[in-house]
């Protein structure tokens, strides 16, 4: 169960690295604007905010990746804590998006389902 949780949270971390790239470096590109449903004007107006938000996603991914590495080298206590903090934050942010923005529920599910399942699997593995 632990390995399943680490795989799920690891894939979630990779997704968040991709989101980091889109928000921080490709925000005004047509494909990114289509993904996020923004116009050129909206993208330009929110470029600084998106750049910053992208780094939040990157930092969460780094927490998860570092946690996975620490679990792999035998530091289950610290590693699991980092995985749960990073992936739990990803899932929580997706839940906030899901609740507060009905038009973005699909995006919330895409970015929140894997970390939520991973957190559940890690917690179950630690509890058993």
Image (cartoon, helix red, strand yellow):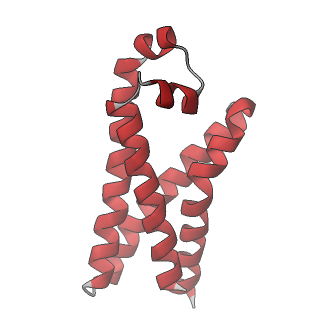
Q: In which quarter of the image is the C terminus?
A: bottom right
Residue at 39 percent across and 74 percent down: it is 80
Query: Quick one: 11 or 65, which is closer to the camera?
Result: 11
Q: Which residue lies furthest to the right in this view?
A: 102
Query: Where 108 sits versus 27, above or below?
Result: below
Q: Position of residue 116 (x, y in %)?
A: 59, 62
Displayed quadrant of residue 97: top right
Q: In which quarter of the image is the N terminus?
A: bottom right
The single residue placed furthest to the bottom in the displayed view is 128
Residue located at (47% from left, 74% from top):
7
Is 68 positioned to the left or the right of 45 in the image? left
Image position of 10 (left or right of 73): right
User: In the rendered view, does 121 fall on the left or right side of 102?
Assistant: left
Instruction: Please tell me which residue lies in front, 43 or 8.
Output: 43
Q: In this view, does 51 lie above or below 127?
A: above
Where residue 46 sits in the image (x, y, percent)?
43, 16
Q: In this view, does 102 lie above or below 72?
A: above
| Among the 4 quarters of the image, the one containing residue 119 | bottom right
Residue 14, quarter of picture: bottom left
Residue 89, given in percent of the width and then of the height, sits at 48, 52
What percent of the width, then of the height, locates residue 82? 36, 65
Q: Residue at the spot x=34%, y=47% of the render?
A: 58
Q: In this view, does 2 lie above or below 13?
A: below
The residue lying at 66 percent from left, 50 percent from top is: 109
In the foreground, 7 or 40: 40
């Amino acid at each position: 169960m632990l390995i399943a949780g680490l795989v799920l949270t690891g894939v979630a971390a990779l997704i968040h690295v991709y989101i980091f790239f889109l928000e921080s470096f490709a925000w005004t590109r047509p494909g990114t604007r289509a993904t996020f449903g923004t116009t050129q004007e909206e993208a330009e107006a929110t470029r600084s905010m998106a750049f910053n938000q992208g780094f939040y996603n990157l930092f969460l991914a780094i927490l998860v990746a570092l946690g996975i590495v620490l679990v792999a080298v035998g530091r289950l206590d610290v590693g699991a804590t980092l995985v749960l903090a990073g992936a739990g934050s990803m899932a929580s942010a997706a839940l906030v998006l899901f609740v507060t923005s009905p038009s973005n529920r699909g995006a919330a599910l895409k970015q929140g389902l894997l970390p939520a399942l991973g957190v559940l699997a890690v917690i179950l593995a630690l509890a058993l």
